[in-house]
Amino acid sequence: MKAPRRPGTGADARGRPGGDGPEPFEAAAARALADPTLQGRLRDVLGRLQRSRRRMIPPHTATDDVRERARLIRAEVIAHLDRYLGDFVDKAEAHGIRVHLARTAADARRIVLEIARRQGVRRVVKGKSMVSEECEIREALEAEGIEVTETDLGELLVQLARQPPSHLIAPAIHMTHARMAEVLAPTADGAALPPDPKVLMTASRRWLRRRFLQADLGLTGANFGVAETGGFFIVTNEGNGRCCGTLPRVHVAMMGIERVLPTWASVPTILQSLVRSATGQRLSVYVSVFHGPRRPGELHGPDDQHLILVDNGRSGLLGGEFAEALHCIRCGACLNACPIYERAGGHAYQAVYGGPIGKVVTPLYGRSPIAEELPHASSLCGACREACPVKIDIPALLIRLRHQHPLPGPMGRAEPSLVRLAGGAMARPRLYRWATRLARWTLARRALAGWVQRGPGPLADWTRNRDLPVPDRRPFRDRWRERRRGRS
Amino acid sequence: MKPELRHYLAELRSALDRQPGRPPLGQQLRRAEEIPLVWPSVEFPPGRSMAEQFEAAIAPWGGVVHHLASAADLLPTLARLIQEAGARRVSRWRTPRLDALHLEEGLAPLGLEWVMPSLERAGELDDVEARRRFFLEMEGIEVGLTDCDVAVAHTGTLVVRHDPSRPAFTNLLPWTNLIVVNASQLVPTLADAVAGLARDQAGEPWPSNLIFNTGPSRSGDIDLTVGQGAAGPGSWHVLLVRDGEPALAPGGPT
């Protein structure tokens, strides 16, 4: 059933097939770093997204407080998910939406295939959906001989290039215009296309239209469902989600169980937080709200509308120390803000969800060959926490995960005792003073221009990817004492 | 609800009940509501009228707003825009507001073909092949002429409830979408529009298909700056009739 596009199964850091199995994050990141084109694209696109997000939710303002409002809404739902999800299902079914539960990715594939078989589906148009990526729905349909067309332009680009998406909301972020022109050639019947964005857009529009009109089934994600009304939302700029949910006779939407909002009145907060954080717009072009199939006399919409609620590991987090990860609204702001993502790019993570939130959920759901390595691929700088529109404390979650999955190697083994030692020293001022002097003396001998590039003992492992600064000749304690003396 | 789902929800409940110190139902939601939903005031400067704000919000995203002093200006403006689009086939909604414009007579000199499928054709959509033919026919339409329920000044958004007389293909398939809006339909913020919808819907079934539409279809996937008309209309014009506009503009969004 597997097509060779899942990361970590023989794809290299940019998703090109041909690697041999999983590659350590370090190695994948190093290769991304050595790719000047990718570095340029990442800097350019992420920089722009980050600047616009800061304009839309300026820090330390009343707008910044809206993040707390959004956090509380998400926390309310997750703390009482049974209740809100139950209300949502009841209301959705009352509108005629057929609700299914997929406990696992395999269940989700089975449900989609059953619907497709029952309806004699041969062609599917698909909107952008991370849950469907997670469940490998496209691969499952294709294995049944069903033609699946990704209709989000970014997803279409990576589909035609046979790569996995590399960003939550900008899947083709790693591609240049020249590469896009190459990849889109089949949409112009193989004719060479110039690397001109307008020409590429026209070619893909014409090609996608034919597919929208021929499709038997539209498959989409759902950004959220509203417990109070039983409707679900699809947010796009292109309108492809609207096409998928409006034109084919069958519409199947997939949604993680956690993506519920309690009330209709909570929609503006979450919707605007999502859009502002994701793309820096005040609102996306199309926010489609679906409340069931076509009614009598209507000249649009599916006759058969399904919603698949996907668990796939999520409910295991409920009530536990990682439940906060379920607050995520998948805006991608933490990816754009992350200094590691900015350099390593999405493919280095070899997982469906990359970047900071990916480093949290991937090991929790255990879905990457390098899952346990990911929580360590962070400097814990906190930029993700500052960017998150629902204030998820990603660094705290990463630290908890590091406890569960210590790094392999000498440093990983030595870390607990080193931390205990440091703790003991900090509790004894005289010992601490002595220890810092010793540390300075030891490190200064190895330093080059104030930086240690290869630490002693187990620290050698730690300094493989980092430089360690030599403690200052005059420690803070001394300076503080002098300052106070000067004042008195 | 299927028994399987009911059983699953019970499992979730028992997992959640184990959580120590869980806030009671509704408590965090009430706390959330105490925090005002405010966006930077530069986005909606005090003293700017809602009509001006609507245009300022949408213009950077490729939406074009035509300010019309009265409904009498609609016909000539529509004629000009339809000609500029080079359109032969035009579709419009059969809503009281658009019916009242008597466009077929008024625009007769343009020799347009008006495509307005009757509700009886809804049956065609039941069958896969007939549905395909129906939408292929609608695909050839160059201009879709529509209206809206509510317009949001702060974000430049139109709220549109689709129903039998307002089919969703009219503002989706044609390259050009012309939308007739009255300034009296403007509300300051998205939160106002959402609250208004909830009031309107009280006791009524929610429409199967409802959209918040902010400008022409666009994509940032090929290039972050260029790209209108990825899947939906690439040309999006609001004809904003400014009679009946509230004299005093409310301030920024709060």
Image (spheres, rainbow, N blue to C red):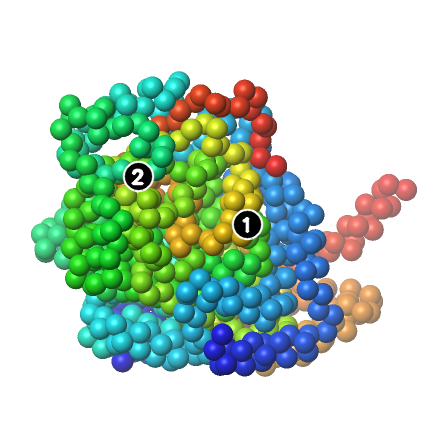
Asked if the residue under mark 2 is in contact with the one under mark 1, i.e. CB atoms within 8 Å, the reply is no
Q: Residue B43's x, y, as percent?
A: 52, 33
Residue A417 location, quadrant: bottom right
Give the left or right position of residue B200, taking residue A284 as reference: right
Kindly identify the amino acid type of the residue bearing the numbered disc 1: Ala
Pick whichever, A227 or A150, lies toward us.
Answer: A227
Residue B111 location, quadrant: top left
Outermost residue on the front side: it is: B120
Kindly identify the amino acid type of the residue bearing the numbered disc 2: Arg
Image height check: is A117 above or below A392?
below
Q: Which residue is mark 2?
A: B94
Image height check: is A348 above or below B183?
below
Which class describes the residues within 10 Å of circle 2: few (<14), some (14-19), or many (20+)?
A: some
Q: Which mark is residue B202?
A: 1
Which class describes the residues within 10 Å of circle 1: few (<14), some (14-19), or many (20+)?
A: few
Can you see residue B76?
yes
**Residue under the image location 50 percent in, 77 percent down:** B5
Pick whichever, A310 or B94, lies toward us.
Answer: B94
The quarter of the rendered structure image containing the C terminus of chain A is top right
Q: Secondary structure at mark 2?
A: loop
The quarter of the rendered structure image containing the N terminus of chain A is bottom left
Tell me which chain the residue with mark 2 is part of: B
**Residue under the image location 17 percent in, 26 percent down:** B108
Q: Secondary structure at mark 1?
A: loop
Q: Residue A329's x, y, as percent?
A: 51, 58
State the CA–CA distance, disc 1 to disc 2: 25 Å
Dot 1 or dot 2: first in sequence order is: 2
Outermost residue on the right side: it is: A488
Q: Residue B159's x, y, as percent?
A: 43, 42
**Residue under the image location 24 percent in, 46 percent down:** B118
**Residue under the image location 31 percent in, 47 percent down:** B167
Pick whichever, A481 or A82, lies toward us.
Answer: A82
